[in-house]
Amino acid sequence: MSVIDLARFERLATERHADFERAEPYPHTVIDNFLPADVAEQVLAEFSRTGEGWNSYRHYNEDKLAMTKIERMGPVTQKVFADLQSKPFIALVGKLSGIKGLIADPDLDGAGMHEIKRGGFLNVHTDFLSHTKNHHWSRQINLLIYFNKDWQKDWNGDLELWDDEMTHSVKSITPILNRCVIFHTREKSFHGHPAKLTCPPDVSRKSIALYYFRDEGTKQVLSSTNYRARPEDSVIKRALITVDRQAVRVYSFLKRYTKLSDGVISRFTKRP
């Protein structure tokens, strides 16, 4: 039995399709109370129970932890991922977005459970646009669900959606418990939460992420995460963002053309 209310999501997909396409700065929607309340609470509890297997992504453009191994996640979290990857749900994401032929990624490449602790951040960026292992897949949709109870806005951590020219943040979305954000991933879908978190030491910013792809039938150009500087960033910071962006490109190349794991490759860009 699905832990996601598919009937409700189908209504929302129908009602919000036009608004999704017209949304600024790029197609997206925000859905509160996405999961049943008890399911959201159980996923939140399972974050603290998940043991070994977290990858650390700690370099100049981000500082976060990620879990991509389904078998290491809690049972309720596993069920949520299974439902998000089910054919009925994927069909409804297609109905919402208007994008046909969507497919889920069983490897959770770059997706999974994400946790960012005090001092962590994620610089503004556009995501990789092609799958590192399935070379014919283009990335189309990001789905994020947040699990942060009593999150305070002054702790930072809002998801910022930026305009095409990176002149300003158009929309800011607070990552509160059980809030879902779905958006179209494209060349200029700039987003992130670049300000360092100021939450208490025993609090972290928790989310799960899932990406949907489309098989284009031809090999896609390797496209790594494209980090960008904000207008207020200093010359030195801009230079460091650029240098780190190049290192991430090498990281993406290694992921596509070698059998090295994320845990091994991430040491390449790791900062002290």
Image (tube, rainbow, N blue to C red):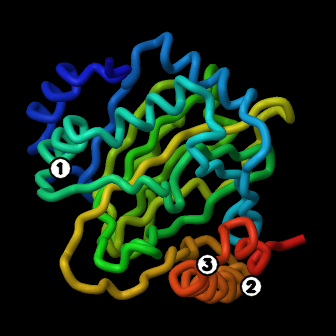
Q: In the displayed structure, would residue 259 be above or below residue 81?
A: below
Left or right, residue 20 beside residue 42: left
Dot 2 lies on which element? helix
Q: Quadrant of residue 60?
A: bottom right
Query: Reading the chain from its start, which is encountered first: label 3 or label 1?
Result: 1
Q: Which mark is residue 97?
A: 1
Residue 215 appears anywhere in the view: yes
Task: Name the residue type under label 2.
Answer: Ile
Residue farthest top in this picture: 38
Give the x, y percent position of residue 266.
72, 71
Q: Which quarter of the rendering shows the C terminus?
A: bottom right
Residue 71 position, x and y percent, is 60, 40
| Secondary structure at numbered mark 3 | loop
Q: Residues within 10 Å of mark 1 (few under 14, many from 20)?
A: many
Labels 3, 1: front one: 3
Horizontal side, residue 203 vs residue 225: left or right = right
Q: Nearer the viewer, residue 47 or 12?
A: 47
Asked where in the image residue 127 lies, by quadrant, the reply is bottom left
Instruction: Give left or right: position of 222 versus 136.
Output: right
Is disc 3 surrounded by few (<14), some (14 to 19) or many (20+) residues within 10 Å?
Answer: few
**Which disc, if any, is residue 236?**
2
Mark 1: amino acid: Ser
Dot 1 falls on a residue whose secondary structure is helix
Q: Position of residue 15 (x, y in %)?
A: 10, 31
Q: Residue at 40% of width from left, 36% of height from top? A: 82
Q: Identity of the amino acid at label 3?
A: Lys
> Which residue bears the numbered disc 3?
259
Mark 3 and mark 1: span between their CA atoms?
34 Å
> 163 or 19, which is in the foreground?
19
